[in-house]
Structure formats: C-alpha cells, structure tokens
Image: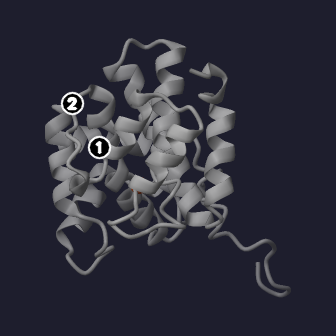
Amino acid sequence: MNGEIQTREAAWHLLTEFTQSESLRKHALAVEACMRACSKKFADGSPDAEELWGIVGLIHDFDYERWPTAEEHPYKGNEILKERGYSDEIRRAVMSHAEYSGVSRDTPMEKALFACDELAGFITAVALIKPGKSLAEVDAKSVRKRMKDKAFARKVNRDDIIQGAAELGVDLDEHIAFCIEAMKAIAKELGLDGSAARPVSAPIGLS
Ligand SMILES: [Fe+2]
C-alpha cells in the first residue's frame, strides 16, 4: 500500500485531473469542509481522521464529470482509485454514497458522506439565491423552507438529506446548521463570501 498517495494534495490533483467544472470542484471542496468538521464530531478527533474524511469528501464525485451515468459513476472512479493505490476504506466510502451501488453505509465516515453530499449542494443553492450570494445569509430555517419548495433546486433529493441525517443519528436542523458553519470556513473558496454579488467598482455618478 502506498501511503503517500493518500494525501490531501494527491486527492486534489486527482480531482482536478478529472474535473474541470468550477462548480463541481466547489462541490468537492464544500463536501470536504463538511466531512472535516464531521470527523471532529464523529471520529477520534485526530489529524489523521480529519485528513481521511476530508479526502473522501474531496474525491467522492471525482469521476462524475467524465462518467456521469449511473452505469459508470462511481464504478469507474472506484477502478481508478484502486489502480492508484487508494485504500479499501476510501473506495468503499466513495461507492457507498451512491444509493444505487448496493454498497451499504456502515461506518460513521460512510454515513457522514451521504449526510453531507446532497445537503452541501442544497446549502450552496440556497446561498446563491440570497441578495449577497453568501453563506452568511443562510441558516437552517431558510434551508428547511427551501426544502419544501419542490420547484427549487429540483435535482437535489430531499429524501437523501433527511435520510442522511437520520442514518448519522443527528437532528436535521442541527446538522444543517453544522454544515453551514463548516462551509462558512471556506466561503471565499466556494465563492459564497458575498464578494460575488458586490460590484468591483461603483459606476461613475452612482455612489
Ligand atoms: Fe456529491
């Protein structure tokens, strides 16, 4: 087993080798941030656990841009991870985040990945419709409200969000607030720090 390959840096290179989409890279970073935060709550709190959980979050969809169908994602990614020496623990977690893969979610890390994946996407969608396009404007209440709006962010499966928190054994509102906070720590990288909505400079004559 090549331990060196399982670093955050190598995982980032893997992600960016296969994923060019800015929004998919941001999704990976958002899930990484949530997973790192979760590791402190549900794992032993060690830096190694945080690195491991973070890597899983970062690469869970790395094959999606090239192989987006349910026939290939995350199976194709799983093969590549194996070729590159990623551990069974990481590969199993990545496989288990796809409901249809048939790989059960057994460990806290696997449960956390499922509980953070769709939710991170949904929190991002809620932030983007706020006037300042920032996470600072998002709270659990506004996320819950939007979850009831079927027309909003239709691709995000609400049942997965609800089921994910239940499997992890956490209150949904608490988990939403927890993930918002985790994402806020990297708001700038996610483009959700409010700067996207601010004009670079005020037009002449308007101040
Ligand atoms: Fe994802």
Disc 2 on helix, strand or loop? loop
Q: Which residue is mark 2?
A: 106
In this rendering, the answer to whether 68 lies above or below 106 is below
Decide: few, some or many residues near mark 2? Use Cα within 10 Å; few <14, some 14-19, many ≥20: few
Q: Quadrant of the N terminus?
A: top right
Whether residues under marks 1 and 2 lie with C-beta atoms below 8 angstroms apart, the answer is yes
Residue 136 visible in image: no
Q: Amino acid at mark 2?
A: Asp
The x, y position of residue 48, in whole percent, is: 52, 16
Q: Residue at x 58, y 49 (%)?
A: 187
Q: Is residue 151 depicted above or below 114 in this figure? A: below
What residue sits 81% from the left and 74% below the top? 201
Front-lying residue, 7 or 149: 7
Indicate the amino acid at tag 1.
Ser
Q: CA distance from mark 1 to mark 2?
A: 9 Å
Q: Point out which mark residue 96 bears.
A: 1
Q: How is the image coloured?
A: one colour
Q: Earlier in the sequence, mark 1 or mark 2?
A: 1
Q: Which quarter of the figure has residue 156?
A: bottom left
